[in-house]
Amino acid sequence: MPSKKKPLGRRRARPTAAPKKAPVQKSKPLVAIYDLTDCEGCELAFVPVVEAVAKTCEIVEWRLTQEKRMDIGDRKIDVAFVEGSPMSAEDREFLGKLRERTKVLVALGACACIGGVPALAGTAEREKFMSLVYSPEYKPKSDTPALPLDTVVKVDYYLHGCPVLPEMAARFLEQVLVGKAPDKFGGYPVCLPCKAAGNPCLLIQGNPCLGPVSAGNCGAPCPTFGKVCYGCTGAVKGGNFTQMRHKLAEILGEEMAEAHLRIFLKDEKGKR
Amino acid sequence: MNMAGSNIDRFVTKIEGHGHIEADFSSSSVKLSIDEGERLFEGIVVGKRYEDVHFITPRICGVCPTAHNIASIRGIEAAFGVKPTETAIALRKAMLAAQIVQSHTLHLFFLSLPDYLGIDSATGLAAKNPKLLKVALSLKNASDALLKAIGGRQVHPTTTIVGGFTRFPTQKEVEASLKLIARTMKDAEAARDACAKAVGDFAPFHRETEYLSLDDYYGDSDVLTSKGEEFNPSDYDKNISEAVKLYSSAKYGTRHEHGFLVGAMARQINAGRRKQTGNTFENNVAQGEEIVEFLAEAQRNLEKAASLGLKRDELAVEFEPKEGVGVGALEAPRGTLYHKFWFDSEGFCTKADIITPTAQNLTNIEEDANAILAQNKDKSQAELQRLLEMLVRAYDPCITCSVH
């Protein structure tokens, strides 16, 4: 709660000491959006809903679009979205501090949830690629591969996708702000919305589609538009990975099958 | 913050990605240091099948994924000798044009215009100038809708493949897109005028430099330079070089050992539509004008695709992967983007080189920053710091792109 000396509201500020800065209204929940090493595609999902968001909550910090942090005094951030992967001591320290001042911490998008595409470069590969891309004298800014957020801090919710779709972001925010448990990921596979859309099965046609083992919360935009599913929304619960591997090996050969699966998934837990 | 024991100031700028300026005000020297973690995309794509390459590279940047996706596809097509149909090319051009409108809108309204208008952010814009926020959201939503109609998603397209498309939009969807463009055009013009008005005659410095851009934004042309030279984009590595700097996870583009500028302003200068004044802040005016130009370009290409019939049998041409090297170059929102790939006979990538517009601009940003300090000696340190941050934002740097 804000201290009496420094009231936070401007529009409804007490007449005694109205501060010039800090236009935080007491009643609105505080939302913050951050990014670590990433492509910023997921936080852009909030841009189309920014008007609606502004009505229901107060964006106290959005590093991409604002320079100054809003002064929130002793209040905690109600919901913090973090996109991207921690890759340095600075990132890990930031996450630790954020966790302390946040009620609900949300991993936003594939990089934050499961490491995303950059996690394809593991520790051994990073050393090799580093010398390919940079010079021998170059000292990397990162000291780990791209890791999921939950390797560093406790994550309350995962909002999967590469990218997170605006309708998913809007629905999630709505649910979490009214105190309803947000939709869980992984309850049904991509095949469900894909079949509902009347698409011919890409896997049966001999394409390496990961729909059967991937969470279908995205609504299957990729197969609907003729592209195989790469599993960016994470693994579906109880997905038959053994058969998926078998089928992929038929299409791509064993070695490529594993590499293909690994772009976003590896096993039932969605970890790689 | 002021670093202990030195007169070097480090400050962070509101940009896409993580970087900071290090300015030594006593000697008028500025370093732009890029702090993003190395993502090593050029390594990640090695060993991947060609169709995974253009799926992976858009993840370099969520602000201009379509540009990376199409640049990769064009590079692969160049390596395999694939020529897509006219309809496919028209739709790719429409996507690229919509991508430029989308990216410019985001940058101008959320990052750079607030500088000139004296507000901090998009939420500040909502409070101070709700009309302008409406214009921004209208343009953003329209370009999102166009990219979704053709590409399947507004970020990271799904319909584009080597050889063409997996799916064309229907005549109905194209008609709806054209109507949307017609409705949005007045907002594009309002955006253009707002940029011209906001920047006005703001010119805190002048410095001559070289401007580079492709004559044709889809890349079927030479790269032109404002010094009257031209080169084939597949010879980019002979004409521009990238230097590793130990303080930065992005590389710095140079040409004849100096910086050069790519992007909206360069495109307009090389097309003879803008005079060279040496004032980089005009880049934001140029971006505003491009919102109108590229919305019209999206319209022309959608009309063309519709008139060609959007035929299913013209979706994608057949081809066989083969051993080879190919360069895909195009004008991304921030300037010329090069993707170069080497493939083995089965279509597996063996090597990759990607040069992003922001990496090309970095040397020029530092040179401009030094010029600002040298030409504004009467200003206070706080004012100078402000100018430097504005300069960096005027370039619309995409740090995520620059560290790929």
Image (cartoon, coloured by chain):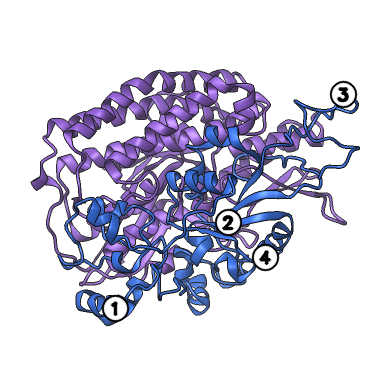
Q: Amino acid at mark 1?
A: Arg
Mark 3 / mark 4, whichever is N-terminal: 3
Front-lying residue, A107 or B233? A107
Kindly report which numbered mark, 3 or 4, lies closer to the viewer in this rendering: 3
SS of the residue at dot 2? strand
Q: Which residue is mark 4?
A: A92
Q: Which residue is mark 1?
A: A245
Relative to A251, say whether A171 is above or below.
Answer: above
Q: Residue at x 46, y 63 (%)?
A: A116
Mark 1 / mark 2, whichever is N-terminal: 2
Q: Which residue is mark 3?
A: A15
In whole angstroms, how far apart are the C-alphas of marks 2 and 4? Answer: 16 Å
Q: Which residue is mark 2?
A: A106
Front-lying residue, B31 or B186? B186
Q: Do badges 1 and 2 share one subunit?
A: yes
Marks 1 and 2 in Cβ contact (< 8 Å): no
Q: Residue at x 62, y 38 (%)?
A: A57
Q: Position of residue B243 (x, y in %)?
A: 54, 58
